[in-house]
Image: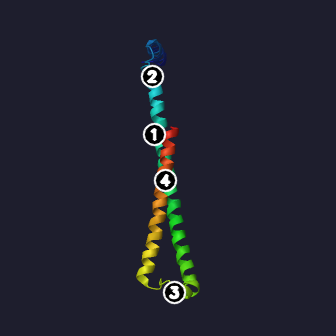
Amino acid sequence: MSEPDLDRELEALGAALRAIPTPMAPAGLAERARVRAMAEWRTQDDRRWDELMLAVLALFAWTVGFTAWALFQWLRGGVVAVLDVGFLDLAKSVTVFTLVAWTTAGVAAVVLGLHRNLARRNV
């Protein structure tokens, strides 16, 4: 085949392709896809927020635990010894610090739950 024959054949093919009607998406498909994508985006955003909140709350729990331990060590040499509260026993100390850590974790869970409930109401 020569070049002019190929050009004519390509022109004819192009004209035939232009004559074919463009397929249309069903009514509402684009809107449903957009709504679904936005819901997925919100879910991912909520997960990222939850992970960030848990990391911050874990850091807060460690900070509170360390601060309580440092404060106890400071008080043990002064005020606690004078008052003779009896926290010098290791088992009691571990129990107190464990309760402080659990309380902090409980507060973190409540705060996270409240945040999640508020976020669901706003959606």
Q: Quadrant of residue 23?
A: top left
**Between disc 3 and disc 2, whose residue precedes?**
2
**Between disc 1 and disc 3, whose residue precedes?**
1
* Residue type marked 2: Gly
Q: Quadrant of residue 98?
A: bottom left
The residue beneath circle 3 is 84
Secondary structure type for disc 3: loop
Label 4 vs label 2, nearer the camera: 4
Label 4 vs label 3, nearer the camera: 3
The residue beneath circle 4 is 112
**Between disc 4 and disc 1, whose residue precedes?**
1
The residue beneath circle 1 is 40
Secondary structure type for disc 1: helix
Q: CA distance from mark 4 to mark 2?
A: 36 Å
**Between disc 2 and disc 1, whose residue precedes?**
2
Tag 1: Cα neighbours inside 10 Å, few (<14), some, or many (≥20)? Answer: few
